Amino acid sequence: MEKVNRRTFLKTAAGGLAVYGGLIQADSTPAMIGRSATNPIRNADTQSWSLVILPDTQVYTSQYPGLLHLQTQWVLENKDRYNIVYVLQNGDVTNNNLEVQWQRASQAFARLDGKVPYAISLGNHDFGPNGSTKDRTTLANEHFPMSRFEKWATFGGAMETGKMDNTFHRFNAAGRDYLILCFEFGPRNEVLEWANQIIEKHPAHQIIIMTHAYLYSDSTRYDWKTKNTEQKWNPHAYPIADTDTTINDGQEMWDKLVKRHPNIFMTVNGHVLNDGLGFLDSAADVGNTVHQMLVNYQMLPEGGGARLRILTFHPDDKTIEVKDYSPLYEKFFTEPDNQFVIHI
């Protein structure tokens, strides 16, 4: 059984810096299934800890590199305040898979090296000539080489030697073991088979799956078989689908991987435009609830205005507080899809 627990957002026609915080408005109050509204985030105490999501950064690396630097600098300055244990980037690091864009990304993330570990998924714009996704060639591994991650105690490994396209990361927070799996855009069957093996070897870890295209902005999973082009930007609609032997979208990942494991509790993705937000709670085959979230702000002014998402895990071991914040505008966003609590 699953229910969509968010409402449709209306975008205003207004633009410009003065009204940036009002570009997205709620049209109704959502039915909160598995989550509820929250007050503005508090300073995390020593028992709380946080993950920070840096949604699709492609406009920053192509047009506004200073905003990505601003994001990573904010993480560094606030790592103790919020007890930030990991940073997640959900794909489309670059816009065109170009040398200069990867250099900008590498320089911004280098600020965190040795201080706050991070995990990166690769999106459609990170593959192929000019980010065309015609094939799986990428400059990512030249600018985020394996040697960069192997120094970290939290780095678990990669599916392919020397390639960061599919990786996993492990850490302990508040006495619990966690594992993050990062997948390429439209992961191949062999990626999901590898992931199944990694999860089976870590039965005591709580699992987060991060990939670029999984949940759509209508808060349903991408499903090429039943919805085809009704959902825009499905991985099956890209040129790579004509050359790869297999491509998996959200529903296929759910069926082949996510619903099979009792310790998967969350998925994170970006990619989707429209309002760039989605949330879905689904019961897996073994009864656990999987919280699936889409977060992407690239379509907003300045490619998102440095918006990032903070997930704060509280000491009660039952709630995750979600807040969206922009270090550029120095403000939290309080609309229901930008501020809520996930009930574990």
Image: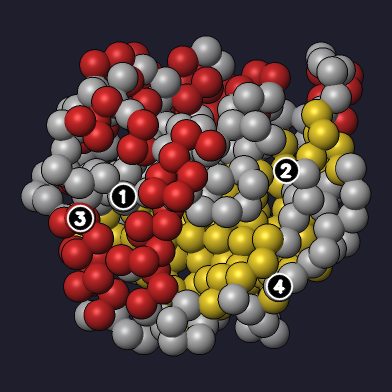
Mark toward the viewer: 1 or 2: 1
- Above or below residue 217? Residue 233 is above
Residue beneath disc 3: 189
The crowding category of the residue bearing disc 3, from other C-alpha atoms within 10 Å (few below 14, some 14 to 19, many at least 20), is some
Residue 73: numbered disc: none
Residue beneath disc 1: 248
Instruction: Evaluate if marks 3 and 4 touch, with contact meaning CB atoms under 8 Å apart.
Output: no
**Residue at mark 1 to residue at mark 2: CA–CA distance:** 32 Å
Of callouts 1 and 4, the N-terminal one: 4
Of callouts 3 and 4, the N-terminal one: 4
- Above or below residue 80? Residue 314 is below
> Where in the figure is residue 145, as x and y percent of width and height?
20, 39
Of callouts 2 and 3, the N-terminal one: 3
Residue 325: numbered disc: 2
Instruction: Evaluate if marks 1 and 3 touch, with contact meaning CB atoms under 8 Å apart.
Output: yes
> Where in the figure is residue 214, as x and y percent of width and height?
46, 50
**Residue at mark 2 to residue at mark 3: CA–CA distance:** 36 Å
Residue beneath disc 4: 34
Instruction: Evaluate if marks 1 and 4 touch, with contact meaning CB atoms under 8 Å apart.
Output: no
- Above or below residue 311? Residue 122 is above
Of callouts 1 and 2, the N-terminal one: 1
Amino acid on which the number 3 mark rests in the picture: Asn
